[in-house]
Amino acid sequence: MMDFAFNQKTASNAPALVVLTMRTERSGYERDGSFSTSQGTHWQSFDAGIAAQTFCLAAHAQGLGTVILGIYEEEKVRAVIDIPEGEAVAALIAIGYPAEEPVCPKRKDTDTLLRMV
């Protein structure tokens, strides 16, 4: 996992690791192969992020904890998992029952996050 100690520790302590994949060259493309948006090949990552969040929220509703790991070496993941051609690894998601209830970090207020234009 690219020698990233936090992800290595998290993945090795999790009872399960979900590999979230995404279809390449599908999301954000028209049937003729042109881009639907100015995001180009990046749009599939947006869809994968929505899927990751939805998965994590559903897991939380079942009493499970998750951590989305975005730092990994895809070729090392492919060496362990048979990922079909035309798909790429979007993220790894460690999942399990939390040992403790974490304290929610302080959030920014809406005046800091939103602006009127």
Image (tube, rainbow, N blue to C red):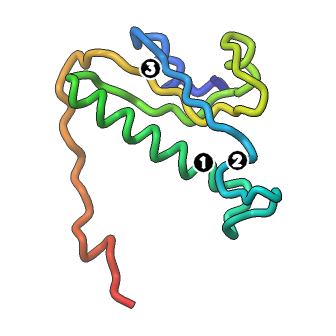
Q: Check disc 1 and give the amino acid type.
A: Ser
Query: Observer-nearest residue: 25 or 117?
Result: 25
Mark 2: give few (<14), some (14-19) or many (20+) Cα within 10 Å: some
Say if 27 sits above or below 110 in the image.
above
> Measured from the top left, where is residue 75 in percent x and y?
76, 23
Disc with the residue nearer the chain's start (1 vs 3): 3
Query: Dot 3 corresponds to which residue?
Result: 10
User: Given the image, on which type of amino acid does mark 3 rest?
Assistant: Thr
Quarter containing the N terminus: top right
Frontmost of labels 2 and 1 is 2
Quarter of the rendering occupied by the C terminus: bottom left
The front one of 54 and 8 is 54
**Of pointers 3 and 2, the one earlier in the residue sequence:** 3
User: Tag 2: residue type?
Assistant: Arg
The residue lying at 78 percent from left, 26 percent from top is: 85
Q: Nearer the viewer, residue 7 or 64?
A: 64
Say which of marks 1 and 3 sits in front. Answer: 1
Report which residue position mark 1 lands on: 45
Disc with the residue nearer the chain's start (2 vs 1): 2
Q: Position of residue 30 (x, y in %)?
A: 73, 59
> Any mark on residue 26, and which?
2
- Crowding at dot 3, Cα within 10 Å, few <14 / some 14-19 / many 20+, comes out as some
